[in-house]
Image (spheres, rainbow, N blue to C red):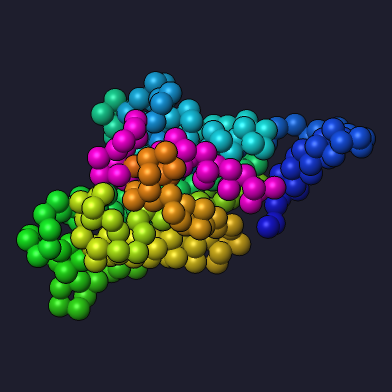
Amino acid sequence: MHFPTRTAAVLLAAGTLLAASAGGVAAEPAGPLDYVALGDSAAAGPLLPDQDLATAGCLRSHQNYPAVVAKAIGARLTDVTCSSARSSHIGAVPQSTFAGTVPPQVDALGVDTDLVTVTIGANDVNLFTTALRCLNPLPEPTGTSCADSFTAGGVDQLRGLVDQAAPQWGATLDAIRAHAPNAEIVVVGYGTYTRPGGCPDRQPMWPRDADYLQHVMDSVNDAMAEQARSRAMTFVDIRPVTVGHDICADPASAHYAGAVPAESAAPLHPTALGMQAIGAHVADRLR
């Protein structure tokens, strides 16, 4: 992974300090990284404990993955993630929330920003609305399959939306680079929300609809990864970390809340445990 000079120096100093604790000689630390977190609800953590009341409309938790990353690498965090954000709210357009309007998230960036993480894209393709349409408590074949509806006539409507949105995601990454010219920019993807075939005995979703929902999420991940890598930015794929910890998992090990959450978390969003796992993985990639 490539890092700008200051980012590399700080991370190297942190590693040197760890070595010193084992008997080595510590180098003078370069000072904490200036870390800015951008993104939507997958990064913000709606309904998770310890909500940030300073920007209540963003439903941002102090225990989200950016907070985990910041603590792990000793960074100074400015968190402007906001639930319901679209890519336009990152780079140019103020976002309206139930508690007021928040400025474009890039306004938090500057020449002194060392590290940026961003999770964005799902709302551009209306993924949460899609997920709601895929919920069906009735056994097959009663009702309508969302997969059948979204792929009627052999045309995958959601994949079409992803293809349309991808250039805008690239433009958003360009805007982040323009506002933070000296920063390491890390794009964090979305996870494994459901396992193959789903779990209709636990979550109200037919097997083919569960597979379609994850297929759409995979399409978002793959398109965003391509946009990031074409700009020499790092893409962190969290799907492997969340496999087996999806909405079908036991609540004690689930990284994502089910359609009816078993704890304080928004449906189909990371749990507190999920945020810990995602943050730890991102921090490991940074190290």
In this rendering, is residue 250 above or below 222?
A: above
Q: Residue 207 location, x and y as percent?
A: 24, 63
Total numbered labels placed on residues in the image: 0
Left or right of residue 104: residue 69 = right
Q: Is residue 89 visible?
A: no
Q: Nearer the viewer, residue 101 or 269?
A: 269
State whether residue 154 is above or below residue 165.
Answer: below
Q: Position of residue 150 (x, y in %)?
A: 19, 66
- Quarter of the image for the N terminus: give it: bottom right
- Magenta span of residues: 258-287
Which residue sits furthest top? 53
Q: Residue at x 12, y 63 (%)?
A: 140
Q: Position of residue 19 (x, y in %)?
A: 85, 39
Q: Is residue 96 above or below residue 232?
A: above
Instruction: Please provide percent x and percent y for residue 285.
Output: 63, 51
271 horizontally vs 210: left or right? right
Q: Is residue 275 magenta?
A: yes
Q: At x 51% / y 58%, what residue is drawn?
A: 240
Depth check, front residue: 272 or 28: 272
Q: Nearer the viewer, residue 237 or 203?
A: 203
| The quadrant where residue 211 appears | bottom left
